[in-house]
Amino acid sequence: MDLNPIKDAFDRVAKKQKMSASKTQEVVDQMMQEIEKSLEIMKAEHSGSEVDCKSVLGELKKELQEIAPLSQLEGTQKELNIALSKYPKQLEKSFNPDISKAYRNIDFDAHTVNQIIAGHFYRQGLFDVGDCFINEAKEPESTAALKSLFSDMYLILEAMKKRNLEPALNWAAANSNKLKENGSDLLLKLHCLQFVEILQGGSRSKALSYVRTHISPFGANHFSEIQKLMASLLWSGRLHHSPYSDLLSATNWNVVAEELTRQFCNLLGKSFESPLSVTIAAGFQGLPPLLKFMTVMAGKRQEWQSMKQLPVPVELDREFQFHSVFVCPVSKEQSTDENPRC
């Protein structure tokens, strides 16, 4: 979906709003200047000078009429109103508010759907929301087992946010063999973060001891990384001003946290991405061509309900393509459950 027209329309509104605000401020400043001048004249009465307040106010009224604030603001306000009126039309043009015509009446397992929704909440760390959903959906307690699968992970991630790597290191060490099988160097990355924390604290001897104890076993496959850590020892306590200041970047923690989440889900037999998020994102991409088709074929709603295959090609990004599709080289038709080999 091309969102550039919406962005352009929004930018036009924002530009007109800034122009209107600037002009309004300019007019207000002019009025305030005249009012303050009149006040200064009227205050002179208290210093012994005779002042005709009525004439001063009359002169002020005349000056304000010459400024004509409403006339000055009318043009910019009109332009802003025009831009604002066009923006909702652009939104309606780009986003179909009624997607019901692309629905299909299909049977689905409500229990499975509830598990996916509850699992999504637990993946996001919204454990109270997940529990509430399970209770209101009247799902069995077995569904709540999803909570325990992710609660440990979030305890580890929360500890990492507080720069406490002990829970993460313990988990990675306990699952080191499985991590190696997956080709992950998560344990080394965690040890590197811990090394930097020690070094930044100013204890060079402790940092060197940590390298020898925990990081040197990775030397065979990660010599360059360890070499960099050893060189950074020379900058103990002042790593910010060293050629190795990138070791202090918060991005390093974010990358390791994401890797830990990915590997944790992998060892649980769960996908890294939430199935609910993937489904909604894929549907967002696939919905426009289906809506366009149903608009053209408005009189064939019944046929749409009974179709075995999508009537129009729906292109999805590669991250949403999980299975290969066999197309018969002769008939050029895709295989189906009823005719798997065409």
Image: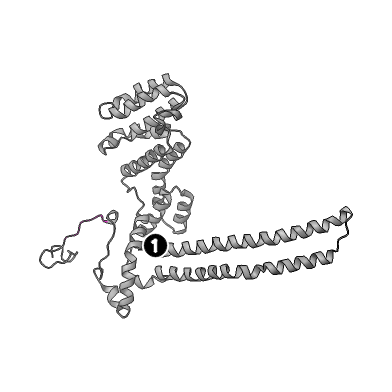
Looking at the image, which residue is at 45% across and 65% down?
9
The dominant secondary structure in magenta is loop
Between 62 and 215, the one nearer to me in the picture: 62
Q: What residue is shown at x 40% (from left), y 22% (from top)?
A: 234
Q: Is 230 in front, or is 23?
A: 23
What residue is drawn where x is 30% and y is 77%? Answer: 297
What is the count of numbered marks? Answer: 1
Does residue 109 appear in the picture of this structure? no
In the picture of the structure, the residue carrying the numbered disc 1 is 4
Image x and y of residue 63, in percent: 72, 66
Secondary structure of residue under mark 1: helix
**Residue lying at the far front of the rendered structure:** 49
Residue 208 visible within the image: yes
Above/below status of 269 relative to 22: above
Label 1 environment density (alpha carbons within 10 Å; few <14, some 14–19, many ≥20): few
> Residue 105 appears at what percent x and percent y?
33, 70
The three-letter amino acid code for the residue at tag 1 is Asn
In this view, 301 is above or below 276: below
Which quadrant would residue 4 be assigned to in this image?
A: bottom left
Residue 200 in percent (x, y) is at 45, 27
Per the rendered image, the range of residues in magenta is: 321-326
The answer to whether residue 317 is magenta is: no
- Please say whether residue 322 is one of the residues in the magenta stretch: yes
Quadrant in which residue 336 is drawn: bottom left
Percent of width and height locating residue 214: 35, 25
What residue occupies the far left of the structure in this picture?
A: 330
